[in-house]
């Protein structure tokens, strides 16, 4: 392997890891935004009826 090849591999790895990090950040922000809000507890204190 020549020095140029090693440099290209290193550059490719750096770009790839940056792309993975950016995708993870985007996915985590998007997930928080789309989470449904939790309903408040029932004021009467009764258990909710579920199917």
Image (spheres, rainbow, N blue to C red):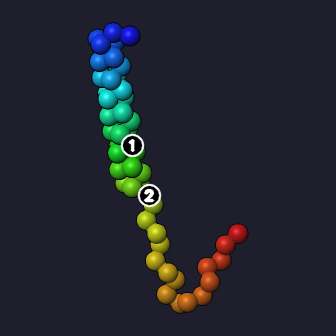
Query: Between 2 and 25, which is closer to the camera in this rendering?
Result: 2
- Looking at the image, which residue is at 46% across and 77% down? 40
Query: Between 34 and 31, which is closer to the camera in this rendering?
Result: 31
| Residue 23 makes an appearance in the image | yes
- Looking at the image, which residue is at 33% across and 9% down? 2
User: What percent of the width, then of the height, locates residue 24?
Assistant: 39, 43
Q: Name the residue under label 2.
A: 35
- Looking at the image, which residue is at 70% across and 69% down? 51
Residue at the bottom extreme, as displayed: 44
Front position among marks 2 and 1 = 1
Residue 40 relative to residue 30: left or right: right
Q: Which of marks 2 and 1 is nearer the N terminus?
A: 1
Q: What secondary structure is marked by label 1?
A: helix
- Looking at the image, which residue is at 62% across and 83% down? 47
Label disc, if present, on residue 9 of the rendered structure: none
Disc 2 versus disc 1: distance between alpha carbons? Answer: 17 Å
Badge 2: few (under 14), some or many (20 or more) residues near its Cα, within 10 Å? few
Quarter of the figure with the N terminus: top left
Label disc, if present, on residue 24 of the rendered structure: 1
């Amino acid at each position: 392997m020549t020095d140029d090849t090693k440099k290209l591999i290193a550059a490719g790895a750096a770009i790839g890891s940056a792309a993975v990090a950016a995708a993870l950040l985007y996915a985590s922000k998007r997930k928080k935004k789309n989470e449904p809000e939790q309903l408040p507890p029932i004021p009467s204190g009764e258990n909710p009826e579920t199917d």
